[in-house]
Image (cartoon, rainbow, N blue to C red):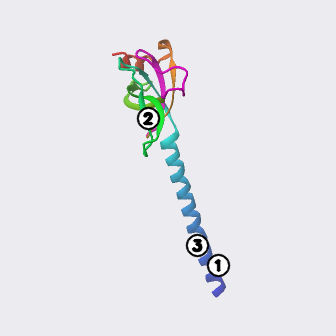
Amino acid sequence: MAQNKRVGVRFMVTLAVVAVVVFAAFQVKQYCDDRYQGTDYYAKVPDIAMTLEPVRSDSGELFGLGKTYRLRASDPAGQLRDLEFLVMQGEVTRMPQPGDYLRVSASKQLVVGWSFMDKASVPQLALEKIDR
């Protein structure tokens, strides 16, 4: 009888550990999806000053020159979202300029990538929103 109790306790402990591991795995997956799984948005770079600014670390170390883009973007269905991202000089062959169309991949938390687009390739509903 005592051995049956020990087996029962071990089973309950094992079950609890498995439940905690599954819960933790779900939380990690959710975090990664929220942070790194991007959705495509479309934006047109507005008529803004293209002055490059010094980019520094939290400790003040100079990384180089860059430009922070703050864009009003649209998903293919026409839903608008404000996006912000930094482009470092030397990281790309050409900095986005006023009038350029961009595809911006953004997660719930940050921009995970971007690329240039032709106006003709931008979905119609998005184009209507960003061409205003």
Q: Magenta segment, principal secondary structure?
A: loop
Give the amino acid type for the residue marked by disc 2 in the picture. Answer: Val
Q: Residues within 10 Å of mark 1 (few under 14, many from 20)?
A: few
Give SS at disc 2: strand
Image mark count: 3
Residue 55 location, quadrant: top left
Rendered-image quadrant of the N terminus: bottom right
User: What's the distance in space between the residues labelled 1 and 3, CA to CA?
Assistant: 10 Å
Judging by the rendered image, the residue that carries numbered circle 2 is 55
Task: Indicate whether 116 appears above or below 6.
Answer: above
Image x and y of residue 51, in percent: 39, 23
> Is residue 102 in the magenta section?
yes
- Residue furthest front as drawn: 61
Judging by the rendered image, the residue that carries numbered circle 1 is 7
Front label number (1 vs 3): 3
Front label number (1 vs 2): 2
In the depicted view, which residue is nearer to us: 129 or 45? Answer: 45
